[in-house]
Image (spheres, rainbow, N blue to C red):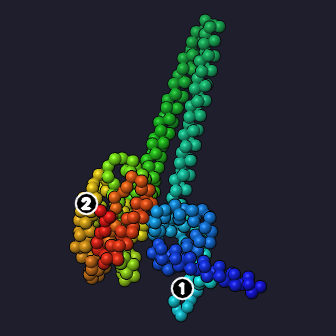
Amino acid sequence: MASAVDNSSKASDRLYAAIGEFLARHRLSVDPVHYAFAHKVLSDQRGPLAAEVARITDGGVRLSSRDIEELGGRAVIGAPASVGGDSVPNLSSPPQLTVVADNTKAQSLVARAQMQVEDFGDTVRAMHADTRGFGQDLRASRDAIRASRDTSAIDEVVRMASSMLDRVSSAEARLQEATHEADRLRRELELARDDARRDPLTGLPNRRAFEDAYAAAVTSSDPVCVAICDVDKFKSVNDRFGHAVGDRVLKAIAEALRTGCDEHLVARYGGEEFVVMFTGLTPDDALSTLEGARAAVAAKRYRLRETDAPLGAVTFSAGLTLVEPDDTIGSAMGRADRLLYVAKEDGRNRIHSDR
């Protein structure tokens, strides 16, 4: 019995150590959401969540808080234990992570699309039935004319032709309405697809859009460089001034990168990280362009909107690498991430390149 307890205790210790290593490797803060996510991944290392984490982090790319949100939906954490008045995760009984799918908008769009498609199908089926009826009526009129020289047969044909013209006109109107609905649905679906590939806070393309653009860019013969940019000491901004100010800082950095790296893809990679993909530039030119954006950000002085108090300088660090012919997105981004780490270690507010 004691041996079983000892083994259980050792297994718990190993899991706890693995969770700590996971959080440190991905530079995630030790909070209940991150702890619960790591516990879920490491408790079922052959499960679908662990497989998706392995795919995203292939080549050394580290997870961000946004990745965790996207993989887990909205996290609902059980009440943490209280120690000395401070809320901390109960390490002996990890918080439970419940996934709540935030897909109401998508479900609504799908339901509306299904209804409109069904309406369109009903219209087409009705037109098909009318067309079949037209043929039957015409055949009957032809046979009647052949069988009789009575003028009343001609009158009947005229009456039927008028009726058929009315039915054709009605069918055309229904078809036109259905076509308009289909066009409107297509536009809405295009907007929804664009929304799914765009970060709602900054308006930049999101990670999924970046990965698709990367896959397309590396098939050409033009040189491609990628950079990971991380806002320096961003956690302290959130801690000191709140998340609303932090969001405004992220939007300001996004706009500065978009302006400074014009004509090149700038995307929000997750959390306080942004990525830039330079296509058709040498590494030196890409570095020069990104350096201009970094200097522009560092030169600005921000103030709090509510009180006009100075926020101070906001800077970012970056790692820039040239994509090699045999690179996967994981290996290229992993290399850029390691260069970013060196830039942070060297004092922040700088860019490190491998060229």
Instruction: Specify the amino acid type for callout 1.
Output: Val
Instruction: Count residues near mark 1 (Cα–Cα under 10 Å), then give few for <14, some for 14-19, many for 20+.
Output: some
Of residues 18 and 209, the one nearer the viewer is: 18
**Which one is nearer the viewer's eye here, 325 or 54?**
325
The image quarter containing residue 43 is: bottom right
Tell whether 254 sits left or right of 103. left
- Residue 198 as seen in the image, left or right of residue 141: left
Give the farthest residue toward the right. 1
Quadrant location, the N terminus: bottom right
Q: Residue reaching furthest top?
A: 149
User: For numbered disc 1, what is the local secondary structure?
Assistant: strand
Camera-side residue of 74 and 347: 347
Where residue 244 sits: x, y (%)?
Answer: 38, 75
Q: Which residue is mark 2?
A: 284
Q: Nearer the viewer, residue 262 or 303?
A: 262
Q: Is residue 255 visible?
A: no
The residue under label 1 is 88
Furthest-bottom residue in this view? 84
**For the residue marked with disc 2, what is the amino acid?**
Asp
Estimate the x, y position of residue 185 in percent, counting from the top left: 47, 46
Q: Position of residue 102 (x, y in %)?
A: 53, 64
Image point (46%, 53%), residue name: 192
Q: Measuring 56% from the left and 31% from the top, which residue is drawn there?
A: 127
Residue drawn 32% across and 52% down? 223
Q: Earlier in the sequence, mark 1 or mark 2?
A: 1
Q: Is residue 249 above or below residue 289?
A: below
Q: Is residue 1 left or right of residue 199?
A: right
Assign the C terminus to one quadrant of the image.
Answer: bottom left
Determine contact: label 1, label 2, CB under 8 Å.
no
Query: In the rendering, at what x and y percent does residue 76 appear?
Result: 56, 74
Which image quadrant is residue 262 in?
bottom left
Does residue 353 appear in the picture of this structure? yes
